[in-house]
Image (spheres, rainbow, N blue to C red):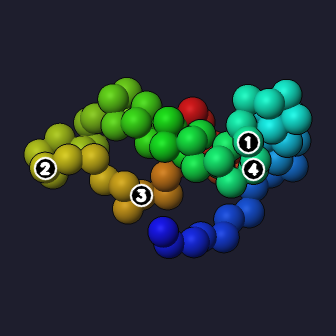
Amino acid sequence: MPKVEITIPEHLEMQIAQMVERGEFVNREEAIEDLLSTGIKAYKTSGPMDEEEGTGGPGLEDDGMMGHDDEYVF
């Protein structure tokens, strides 16, 4: 499986740590993988469609943050 390195805002790191502490995920890696997968699925089903119409599918090459500069939307 490919490895990636990301930088996320402190508040997101804290939320992920809390979910792991509560036992919602086994560890941070599982949490990030699952949350990222869920976010991509949500983006595909409810993401912006007007700039993607006629392109043959969602443009994941965009910034991936749905226009937000400092937070990911899931």
Q: Nearer the viewer, mark 4 or mark 3?
A: 4
Q: CA distance from mark 3 to mark 1?
A: 30 Å
Q: CA distance from mark 4 to mark 2?
A: 34 Å
Q: CA distance from mark 2 to mark 1?
A: 37 Å
Q: Marks 3 and 4: in contact by CB < 8 Å?
A: no
The residue that label 2 is drawn on is 56
The residue that label 1 is drawn on is 26
Point 49% across, 43% down: residue:
37
**What element does badge 3 sit on?**
loop
Please, is residue 9 above or below residue 6 in the view? Answer: above
Please, is residue 15 above or below residue 62 in the view? Answer: above
The picture quadrant where one finds residue 41 is top left
Residue 7 in the image, given as x and y percentages of width and height: 74, 63
Q: Amino acid at mark 1?
A: Val
Q: Is residue 14 left or right of residue 48?
A: right
Q: CA distance from mark 4 to mark 1?
A: 7 Å
The residue that label 3 is drawn on is 62
Q: Nearer the viewer, mark 3 or mark 1?
A: 1
Between 73 and 3, the one lying in front of the other is 3
Between 14 and 69, the one lying in front of the other is 14
Residue 19 in the image, given as x and y percentages of width and height: 79, 32
Q: Amino acid at mark 2?
A: Gly
Q: CA distance from mark 4 to mark 3?
A: 25 Å
The picture quadrant where one finds residue 47 is top left
